[in-house]
Image: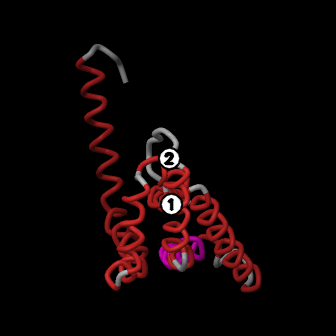
């Protein structure tokens, strides 16, 4: 389940910037809506498929021996639907966010790029790339968490706080 939450948070981070700024201009919002349409075309489906391929095996292992095949099939269907709904909701507000961070001319430059052959390939390929990056990160997360906890404990101890 931790993997599912990590993957969902990772997917959300791909769709939305982390900090907010002032609202963008109406012109920037219009350009951002066009950009979002281009960017979310098949991306949501690809992200959902890639995340399903990455996460589903552990869910199947968790429930596979406890439920019949019809229940397992329904669980997978529900997982896929929920993931697609989540990804769609996360990306719904993206144009307003893009408009806060980019000017209308910058957004139009991005539109031009994503309409180019390389941009179109990036849109098709990046969900797979990001899933692979996430997969590569996963084995290192426990060591990272342990290292971070150790460092935090050292700083706290240095300043007289007990763990």
CB contact under 8 Å: marks 2 and 1: yes
The residue indicated by pointer 2 is 24
**82 sits left or right of 160 in the view:** right
Q: Position of residue 104 (x, y in %)?
A: 43, 56
Residue 115: image quadrant is bottom left
Q: Which residues are magenta?
A: 47-61
| Residue at position x 44%, y 42% in the image | 19
| Residue at position x 50%, y 46% in the image | 24
Q: Position of residue 95 (x, y in %)?
A: 54, 57
Asked whether residue 56 appears in the rendered view, the answer is no
User: Is residue 67 or residue 59 the one in the foreground?
Assistant: 59
User: Is residue 99 or residue 161 the one in the foreground?
Assistant: 99
Depicted 35 relative to depicted 71: above or below: above
Depicted 34 relative to depicted 125: above or below: above
Residue 56 sits inside the magenta stretch: yes
The residue indicated by pointer 1 is 32
Residue 74: image quadrant is bottom right
Magenta residues, dominant SS class: helix
**75 sits left or right of 35 in the view:** right
| Residue at position x 35%, y 19% in the image | 162
């Amino acid at each position: 389940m931790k993997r599912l939450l990590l993957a969902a948070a990772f997917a959300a981070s791909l769709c939305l910037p982390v900090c907010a700024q002032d609202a963008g201009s109406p012109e920037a919002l219009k350009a951002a809506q066009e950009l979002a349409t281009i960017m979310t075309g098949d991306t949501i489906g690809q992200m959902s498929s890639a995340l399903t391929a990455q996460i589903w095996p552990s869910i199947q292992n968790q429930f596979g021996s406890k439920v019949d095949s019809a229940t397992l099939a329904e669980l997978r269907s529900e997982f896929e639907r929920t993931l697609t709904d989540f990804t769609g909701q996360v990306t719904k507000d993206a144009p307003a966010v893009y408009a806060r961070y980019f000017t209308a001319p910058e957004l139009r430059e991005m539109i031009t790029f994503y309409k180019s052959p390389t941009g179109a390939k990036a849109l098709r390929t990046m969900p797979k790339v990001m899933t692979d990056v996430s997969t590569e990160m996963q084995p290192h997360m426990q060591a990272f968490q342990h290292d971070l906890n150790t460092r935090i404990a050292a700083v706290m101890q240095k300043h007289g706080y007990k763990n």
